[in-house]
Amino acid sequence: MKNEGFILPPLVPGTLIKRYKRFLADVILETGETITVHCPNSGSMKGCAIPGSLVFLSHSSNPKRKYEYTWELVQTPGTLIGINTQIPNAFVKQCIEKGLIPELSGYDRVTGEVKTSAHTRLDLVLEKTECLENRENQKCYVEIKNCTLVEDGMAMFPDAVTERGQKHLEELETLVSMGHRGVIFFLVQRMDAKGFRPADEIDKAYGEKLRKAFKNRVEIMVWDTVINPQAIRIGHPLPITLD
């Protein structure tokens, strides 16, 4: 099926001055005007928020918004990087529905933001409406993570300690033990990664829980992307190193 990609709104270029308070950044536009923009990323953004970098912003005309612009992309020496963590869920859902991820094909209903227990929601659940013998109740639960950290050609997650991410792995393990599929899906929003590994030096506990989940039949999928200022397209699966 044709890979049209996730179409981005018209973007405005600028130069990053600094990112601060996690969700804010100051940017100089080509007109010379300095503005404060919304940064839709709660991680450390290690390597993605270097002052002087070329950034691309989307604009909103919503009068209720405090900041008109949202930071979407950053240009580094080797690649464009998508930093908006609100995009991966919708993008991966779109790719699954279009059959662009073979390992997640064969399902005809994809639902987002599913409550799986009293205090946990996962990003997607995939279901088959046909009742297949011995698989009537099997669903495929997918938790999606945005990955922007790459060092020495290796994409790594997380870029900051994430207790919430650890709980998601535990929830997937529980669902697999109940007879469902469980998938942790890392979307690498950049084009310079050759492989993937957990960022043990940043969050050792997450790395340990990811390996444990994998041993308990939680599937790990890692795909890169092809990015330009007009669209983000799904790329290829990346090899995974858990050693």
Image (tube, helix red, strand yellow):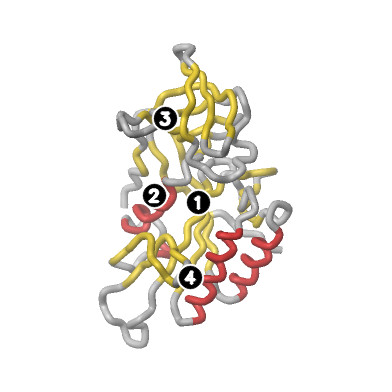
Disc 1 residue type (three-letter): Leu
| Residue neighbourhood size for the residue with mark 4, other residues' Cα within 10 Å, grouped as few (<14), some (14–19), many (≥20) | many
Q: Secondary structure at mark 1?
A: strand
Residue under pointer 3 = 67
Q: Counting other residues with Cα less than 10 Å from the Cα at mark 2, is it few (<14), some (14-19), or many (20 or more)?
A: some
Task: Residue 41 in the image: state x and y as whole percent.
Answer: 52, 42
Residue type at mark 4 is Gly
Left or right: where 21 falls relative to 96:
right
4 or 1: tag closer to the N-terminus: 4
**Residue type for callout 3:** Tyr
Q: Pointer 1: residues within 10 angstroms few (<14), some, or many (20+)?
A: many
The residue to which callout 2 is attached is: 91
Q: Residue at x 36, y 58 (%)?
A: 96
- Give the Cα distance between marks 4 and 1: 16 Å
* Disc nearer the start of the sequence (1/3): 3
Measuring from the top left, give residue 183's x and y in whole percent: 49, 66
Taking the spot 30% from the left edge, 73% from the top edge, the residue there is: 128
Tag 4 near tag 1, CB within 8 Å: no
**Quarter placement of the C terminus:** bottom right
Are discs 2 and 1 less than 8 Å apart at CB?
yes
Q: Position of residue 168 (x, y in %)?
A: 53, 65
What is the secondary structure assignment of the residue under circle 3? loop
Q: Dividing the picture into quarters, in which one does residue 242 lie?
A: bottom right
Numbered mark located on residue 187 in the image: 1
Task: Tell me the kind of residue under disc 2.
Answer: Phe
Question: Which residue of the protein is positioned furthest toward the right in this rendering?
Answer: 201
Q: Earlier in the sequence, mark 3 or mark 2?
A: 3
220 shown above or below 44 = below
